[in-house]
Image (cartoon, coloured by chain):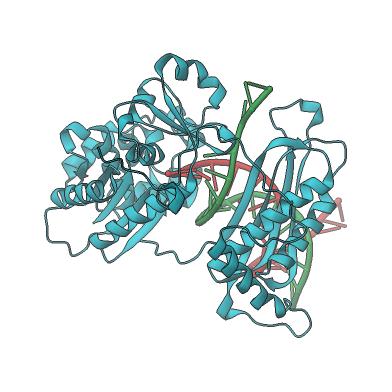
Chain colours: A cyan, B green, C red
Amino acid sequence: MFALVDCNNFYASCERMFNPSLNGKPVVVLSNNDGCVIARSNEAKALGVGMAVPAFQIQHLVERNQIVVFSANFPLYGDMSQRVMSILSGYSPEQEIYSIDECFLNLDGIQEDFTDYGLRMRSHVLKWTGIPVSVGIAPTKTLAKVANHIAKKFHDRTGGSYVIDSELRRIKALKWLKVEDVWGIGRRQAIKLKAIGVQTAYEFSLLDKEWVRRHMTINGVKLLEELNGQKAHDMELKEKRQSIAITRTFEKEYTKQEELSERITTFAVTAAEKLRRQKSFCRSLIVFISTNRFGDACEQYSNSLHVKLPFPTSSSIELSKAATSALNRIFKNDFRYKRAGVILMDFINETELQPSLFFNSDPRHKSLMQTIDKLNNKFGNPVLKLAAQEFRTWKMKQEHLSPRYTTNINEVIRVKLL
DNA sequence: TCTGGGGTCCTAGGACCC
DNA sequence: TCTGGGGTCCTAGGACCC
């Protein structure tokens, strides 16, 4: 059996955790630059605040209903996530952290009643972190997702834990679940399926396997099997990322290549730090730039370049050089750039590096990077930068930022004794 | 005025090989 | 007029996830 444990309205719950006066009130969290909605409390959902809606479009709702708005505080969410995951790891020898707010647990060998087990996890996490979670348990990962959906949706009845462990429950659940809400069926597939009269997960589960394979590839077939109770996905105990991306929508539009180049350099340096943290080397990278996609149609330009590196490296210097030279090749004057990014890929493990006879990463960079990482970790990022990076740190729009309660000693919560 | 960021996997088709 | 057959590898782009 698999459990899927998912934090309820995770970012909003993190904010409320340190500000209990917000309990019962509508809360939303915005993306970088206070751009659009990325988390909503149940109260905010009920008021009609949609997911991923631009902030300015809900301004009237915010004012009319006194919705409390937060700027994204990723240091806080990342730290809270670690705490939640750490507690949950005690409930199974195998934990797959699927995203910042959810994980799968392998429950093979658990003797306790599954519903109770789920409830126990839930109250444990709630007590120790203040974050409410929902637990779905079933014989396949996809059905565990379905069970989780039910646990959350009918919290009053389930208490936040639901188990699909019989044909009766499986069929009842699938008949209830709309096909577009199945894990793995997105907008495109949902349209196709509805066109042939499939409305529910149950109707999907009865489709002919060949038809599904032809129209939805191997993923569709796996989905079909999983919904029918046959395991097609196992725990994925992932070690390392296969790609690392740093991309940003800028707070302003850039026209000068030097300015863009500084930002790209910083993206590459940041990505390189992450690369070194997971002890990998990278063999290629993509740089992309783009004008404002919401702007005037005739002023649009976007381009990307995938460059192979002459040798595997994790050096910030070498990676940022490669990135800026890629930028030089795609940059065009007379455009106003609003978005750009660097994506590292094609990794190998540090330990599996085969030096080449002719071209290799500069060996001196290894200890240099170690020292830079050490200093930046100790004194806060980034005391040390490359000269090619921008001099001042860019300030994104964050008008509703909460303190970093759990990761910065100067911002810990203060308790006043009366 | 204002419109996010970070991932994974699959497939079709091109380039190349014999 | 007729113009083989069987492979592998790589990549861009699509679809999906949170």
Residue lying farthest to the front in this orientation: A418
Q: Where is residue A361 in the image (x, y as percent from the top left)?
A: 72, 76
Give the quadrant of residue A337.
top right
- Eyeballing the image, is A347 above or below A390? below
Give the quadrant of residue A158.
top left
- Eyeballing the image, is B1 above or below A86? above
Q: Where is residue A10 in the image (x, y as percent from the top left)?
A: 37, 41
Q: Position of residue A289 (x, y in %)?
A: 74, 44
Q: From the viewer's side, name the closer residue of A87 and A357.
A: A87
The residue sitting at 48% across, 46% down in the picture is A74
Q: In which quarter of the image is the C terminus of chain A?
A: top left
Q: Can residue A227 be seen in this view?
A: no
Q: From the viewer's side, name the closer residue of A378 and A174.
A: A378
> Taking A42 as reference, is A189 left or right?
right
Q: Quadrant of the N terminus of chain A?
A: bottom left
Residue lying farthest to the bottom in this orientation: A357
Q: Is residue A241 visible?
A: yes
Q: From the viewer's side, name the closer residue of A47 and A377.
A: A377
The residue sitting at 25% across, 62% down in the picture is A90
- Eyeballing the image, is A47 above or below C7? above
Q: Position of residue C15 (x, y in %)?
A: 53, 41
Q: From the viewer's side, name the closer residue of A415 and A221.
A: A415
The residue sitting at 74% across, 51% down in the picture is A390
Count of numbered tags: 0
> Taking A21 as reference, is A121 left or right?
left
